Amino acid sequence: MYSEILSGAIVGIQAYMVGVEVDIAPGLPCFNMVGSLGSEVRESRERVSVALKNAKIPIPCAHITVNLSPADQRKEGTAFDLPIAVGVLQSMEYFSEESTKDVLFLGELGLNGEIRRVKGVLPIVREAARLGIRECIVPRENAQEGAVIPGIKVRGAGNIGEILQFLRDGEKAQELLPAHVEVEELFDDGREPEEDFSQVNGQEAAKRAAEIAAAGFHNLLLTGPPGAGKSMIARRIPGILPPLTVEESLEVTAVYSVAGMLGEKALMTDRPFQSPHHTVSQAAFIGGSTIPKPGVISLAHRGVLFLDELPEFSRGILDGMRQPLEEHRVHVSRVNGSVTYPAEFMLVCAMNPCPCGYYPNINRCHCTQPQVKRYMGKISGPVLDRIDLCVELRPVELESIRAKVKGESSRQIRERVMAARLIQEKRFRGSHCRFNADIEAADVEQYCPLGEEEQACAGQLYDSLNLSARGYHRLLKVARTIADLEGAQTIQTEHLLEAACYRPAQSYWL
């Protein structure tokens, strides 16, 4: 008896449908599986056989063949256990073919018949909904994750017995009721971030730079001695970014779902904040491994990637960011194929100006000039050229620490940021850009026009700051964001001058 069950798989974060074909025929008893399978998929035959046995469903002594099509696409993971088991049951005529028509199955089987959580449910359910599949049956722990996708029924199952009961009795089986999630309620929780800018004493210049960076999604570098507040400011930047839209939230959730890091959440509603240690491996940072999975830069998609102690990161990791910073995606090539992960993040970096951290304070810094130059030289020119804003923090004065008057809260700063983002949304409507940082070189003149006086000022800045073409365009984009924060229609001279103040400190990299 032949049967075919619908399932799905992931390449990168893109889903595709997989047909699980099962044939049970008289012959030498065996359980063969074909279709370009990884080791976890090949092990499914043992899990399925024992799970069905322990569920009091005897498997006949027959020649069982399972094929996962398309056969030329590599299959990885444990999500095929459930569709294989359902295919075996259908081939044994436990239920009709009509009961599994347009139904997608995903899930890992325990030896006791329990259905366990798997990775990548959200993108697979989303692709199934796009193709018009009527419903999906997934592990109960993944049901809320899949239910955020509209236009498709998602049912969560706890064990193979519930699946069998449902496929026999249909809607009469109460165990597999469709999961339901109110997406709007997930976003409308009214929570304020615990880490607030009102907790930061002094450092007004750094706060201003963080506000500009958040408004235009620009890259930011904070330099200064230990204890000046670099990390403190960086960790509060997600609190002034606009909330995720539903579409952005689905993108972020898909990455975390594929990485198996979604946890109990149905949807990622907060901007990601990733802060890897400087000993992170290149595969963990960029993405890859033997079985490719998203790296740190993809987990920071639509959020903030914070690199503390920037010069301590390896040269390969820092230079490996150059392409993702420009293209907003990362390509991972392996023997078994290539995958692409999204990587549109706001880069925030923090660093000391020298190995001891106190340069140029000659009273505290004992580093030699070659040591300082070598330390700063760990950051290559191409990486530095992709930094939009750089601000130097000074030690906080005692009066600022003791001050009883708190500074602006994250809510107040976020209101200005969102007003600037609204201006950008209107400006870029119908284009590929979302923020000022997205403006490509060919479009700079269109979106950042300058008057005669401003052109003369920009020319002087280009020469005096020794800018590259990329650096010049980034200067204009930062000036455009400053103008948006001020509510100005065009870029003025003062906007250009303020943007120039945020170019990387030349005294450090001479």
Image (cartoon, rainbow, N blue to C red):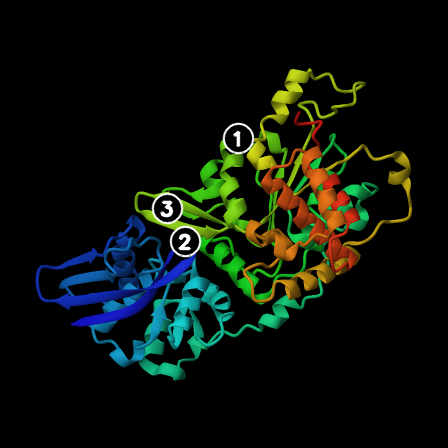
Residue 80 lies in quadrant: bottom left
Q: Which mark is residue 330?
A: none
Distance from Cα at disc 3 to Cα at disc 1 = 23 Å
As displayed, is residue 378 above or below residue 393? above
Decide: few, some or many residues near mark 2? Use Cα within 10 Å; few <14, some 14-19, many ≥20. Answer: many
**SS under mark 3:** loop
Decide: few, some or many residues near mark 3? Use Cα within 10 Å; few <14, some 14-19, many ≥20. Answer: few
Q: Which mark is residue 12?
A: 2
Q: Which residue is mark 1?
A: 314
As displayed, is residue 392 above or below residue 193? above
Q: Position of residue 487 (x, y in %)?
A: 77, 60
Mark 3 touching mark 1, by CB under 8 A?
no
Distance from Cα at disc 1 to Cα at disc 2 = 25 Å
Residue shown at 27% from the left, 59% from the top:
50
Quarter holding the N terminus? bottom left
Among numbered discs 1 and 2, the one appearing first in the sequence: 2
Residue 390 visible in the current orientation: no
Q: In the image, 493: left or right of 310?
A: right
Single out the mark in the foreground, 3 or 1.
Answer: 1
Q: Position of residue 261 (x, y in %)?
A: 50, 53
Q: Name which residue type carries label 2.
A: Gly
Mark 3 touching mark 2, by CB under 8 A?
no
Q: Which residue is mark 3?
A: 291
**SS under mark 1:** loop
In depth, the one of 243 and 220 nearer the eye is 220
Q: Name which residue type carries label 1.
A: Ser
As displayed, is residue 265 above or below residue 102? above
Residue 47 visible in the current orientation: yes
Among numbered discs 3 and 2, the one appearing first in the sequence: 2
As displayed, is residue 214 above or below residue 90? above
Among numbered discs 3 and 1, the one appearing first in the sequence: 3
